[in-house]
Amino acid sequence: MYKIVAAKELAPKIKLFEIYAPEMAEKAKPGQFIMVVVGEKGERVPLTIAGYDAKKGTIAFAFNEVGKSTKQLGLLKEGDYIWNITGPLGNPSEIRNFGKVLCVAGGVMIAPMLLQVKALREAGNTVVTVIGARIKELLFYREEIKALSHSFYVATDDGSEGYKGLDFLKEILAKENFDRCIAMGPVSMLKTVSEITKPLKIPTIVTLMPPMVDGMGMCGVCRVSVGGKMMFGCVDGPEFDGHLVDYEELVKRQRMLLPEERLSSVLWELGGCGCGRK
Amino acid sequence: MAESKPKPKVKKEAVPIPKQPPEVRRRNFNEVALGYTEEQALEEANRCLQCIKPQCVKGCPVEIDIPAFIKLLREGKYEEGIRKIKEKNSLPAICGRVCPQEEQCQKFCVLGKVGDPVSIGRLERFLADWERARGFTNPEKAPPTGKKVAIIGAGPAGLTAAADLAKLGHKVVIFEALHLPGGVLVYGIPEFRLPKSIVQAEVDYIKKLGVEFKLGYLIGRTYTIPELLKERGFDAVFIGTGAGLPQFLGVPGENLGGIYSASEFLIRVNLMKAYAFPDYDTPIRVGRHVAVIGGGNVAMDSARSALRLGAEQVCIVYRRTREELPAREEEIENAEEEGIICKFLAAPKRFIGDEKGWVKQMECIAMELGPPDESGRRRPIPIKGSEFLMDTDTVIIAIGRTPNPIIQRTTEGLEVTEWGTIVADENGKTSLEGVYAGGDIVTGEATVISAMGAGKRAARAIHEYLMSKK
C-alpha cells in the first residue's frame, strides 16, 4: 500500500499524484516508469515518473483519466492509499551535455518532460521546449517549463493557444541547429516530430508507452518494431530512436483491446450492465 | 496393523481420480481433478507394497519418504502423514497437483511393472487437502540465529528456500517483482489445474513461519544484490527469478493483433484473472479459431484456457508428432477429452492480418521427422512446397520461455552462461560469496518440483554457509 501525500489537478482529467515511496524515490531517474495497481482487481497500468524527491521519500506521476483504472485512480485523494506500485522500471534516459536540445511534449507527458528539462539543464544543455495539447485548456506547467528553458513555445491542435499544429517546428529547425530532440506524448505527435527531424538528421529520442501487463519483460505485449527488430517497450525502452519506430504498427497494437477497455469503463461508470451483477 | 503388510493380491489398476466431465469443464475455470475421497485414498494407499528398498524415493527431487507417508495414511494417521511429507516438502498441495509424477516417483514404483504404479501424487494431494481443510497447525521453528536472508522471487524455488531457512531460525525476506506471490504458480499454471486459493494457503503457511513478503520489488532496479548484502543487512541471497521471458518465432506478421505470447495470455488469464473480466479489470480477447504453437505444458494450459474463454475451436500446432509432445501425458489426455485438436508436423511461416491489423490467417509448412538432434528427439525438417493456409483469429505462441535477465545484468561478478542462466553448483552456490541460485534461472525452463528441489538444496547450503560465518 502506498500513501498519496499530494494530489493535484493539472488540467481537466489530468492529475498528478505524489506518493510516499522512499525506496523508489532513492532509485528513480528521469525516463523510468512505474506499474500502478489501483486495487485488488485492478490492471497494471504503466505510468512515467514525473518527479522524485529522495529527501521527502516521494515520487510523482501524472495520469489522464481515460479508462476504468485511471478514472478509479482519479477518485483517490490525498491521504488515500494505492494498492501496489512497482518501480522504478525501464532504462533511465541518457542525460549528458549534448549541446542544444529540442524537447517536445504533448498532453499528460508534459509532466515527465519537466523532469527531463530540469536534468538536461543541469547537464549544461541549451534547452528549447515545446509543449502542446489538443486545446489550450489541457495545457499545464507553462511557467515551470518556461522558467527552465532557453526558449519556449506552445502549440495546440486547434490553434486556441500558441501555434496551430507542429509545422512551425520546421521553421525553428531551419533557423537553428539542434544536437538532439526528445519527444514525449501521444504516438501521433511522436510520429510527426520524428518525420520533421529525420531529414535534418537530428537524433530523436521518443518515449513509448505501449500496452503492458507486467512491465518487466515477461508478457511481450509491449513489443514494438524498431528498425525492423522486435523490441520490448518495458525492458529495451521506454526510449527508442524515433526515426526507426514503426508507428503504424504501434497505433494498431495500442488499439487492440480498445473495445474491451471501453466496455470496462462504461460498465463501471454505469455501476454494472443492468443485469444486476456488479 | 494388518493393512501395513502387502496383501496377497494387489489390484493392478489405480483408483481413478474423480474429474469434472469434459463437456462441463471445458467451459469453466474450476479445478478439473477433484481429488480422492477418504475411501478412495485408503483404497489406493493399500495398493502400496511398502517395499523394503523403495524405488519411488529415488525419483523424488525432494526425497520425500513416500512409503512412510503412505503407511501413515492407510493407518488413518493423516496428521503424522502430512508431517512426514512436510519434513521434505513445504508445498504438498501444489506438488500433488502439478508434479509430473509419472516421470518421477511413480516411474520407479515396482507396481508399474505389472500394472499402474501407486498414485503417489494423488495421495500427497489428499493429505495436503485434508490438512488445509482442517487448518494448519503452527510449524516448529529453530531459535533465531540472527542471520538475515534475502530471497529473490516468490516462485516454487524461492518459497521452498524461504520456508526451509525460516524453519532453521533465519530471518527471511522474499522480494517478489509482481504484486502477488507465487511466481509461475500464479501467473503460469491455470486455475483449473492449480486453484490460486491453494497457492495462497501455502503462502500463508510460509508467512506463519515468519517470512516477510515484499511485493512489487524488482531486484536489479529497486535494489541490486550487492546493495542487499552491503547496505541492507542481508547475510546471504537466494536468486529464484525463474524463466519468464517469452520466445517468439521470428516470422513475419508476429506483431499483429490477436497474437499473444503464452506468457502474455497466461498472465492475463491467471495472474490478472481476465476470465472474470469485467469484474477484474484486465481484458483478453479470444476469437473463434485459436491456434496454439508449441507442444509443452504451457501450450496445453494455453489451449485449454482459450477453450474455457469461449473459443469454438482450439488447435495445437506442433512441428513433431504426438509421441514427441513434451507435455505431461495426463494433460494431453485432458486436452484431448475437452476437444482440443492437434495439427502435428506443421510450423507457422508467417501470419496474415486484416485491414485493422488483426490476424486472420497463418501460413504453415509441413514437416517430416529426420534423424535425432542433440536433444535426442527427431529433428523436424520442412517439406519443400508443402505450405498451406489455416484460418485463425487468435494465436498463442508457446515455444518456451527464457531466463529473466535483470539480475544477471545488474550483478557484477555473477557468472552467467551464454543462454542467460546463472552458473551455480548443485547446492546453488554461484560465483559470488553468499549468493545462491536455483530453479529455472539456473537450469532453464523446467518443472515446479525441480525448482523446489533446488530451493531445498540451496537452503541447506545457505544454512551451512551462515553458520560457518562469524
Image (cartoon, coloured by chain):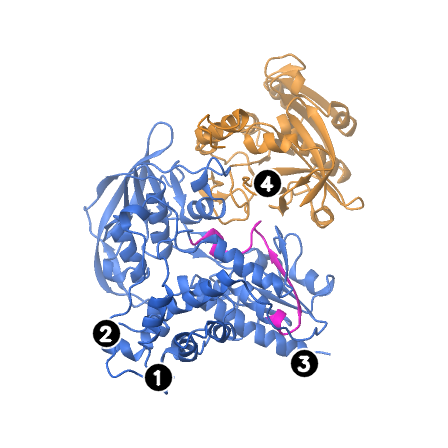
Q: Residue at x 29, y 65 (%)?
A: B373
Q: Please name the amino acid that badge 2 sits on.
A: Lys
Q: Give the percent coordinates (x, y) of residue A136.
A: 66, 16
As measured in the structure, the alpha-carbon distance from the residue carrying label 3 to the one carrying label 1 is: 48 Å
The subunit carrying tag 3 is B
Q: Residue at x 35, y 27 (%)?
A: B355
Q: Are marks 4 and 2 in contact (CB under 8 Å)?
A: no
Q: Residue at x 72, y 72 (%)?
A: B146
Residue picked out by circle 3: B468
As measured in the structure, the alpha-carbon distance from the residue carrying label 3 to the one carrying label 4 is: 45 Å
Q: Is residue B121 in sight in this rendering? A: yes
- Chain that the image shows in blue: B
Q: Please name the amino acid that badge 1 sits on.
A: Ala
Closest to the observer: B102 or B382?
Answer: B102
Asked if marks 2 and 1 fall on the same chain, the answer is: yes
Measured along the vertical axis of the image, is residue A111 above or below residue A217?
A: above
Disc 2 vs disc 1: which is toward the camera? 1
Closest to the observer: A180 or A228?
Answer: A228
In the structure shown, which secondary structural element does the residue marked by tag 4 occupy? loop
Q: Give the percent coordinates (x, y) of residue B413.
A: 62, 66
Q: Residues within 10 Å of mark 3 (few under 14, many from 20)?
A: few
The subunit carrying tag 4 is A
As measured in the structure, the alpha-carbon distance from the residue carrying label 4 to the one carrying label 1 is: 56 Å
As measured in the structure, the alpha-carbon distance from the residue carrying label 2 to the one carrying label 1 is: 20 Å
- Give the magenta-colored segment's residue range: B165-189
Q: Is residue B171 magenta?
A: yes
Residue picked out by circle 1: B2
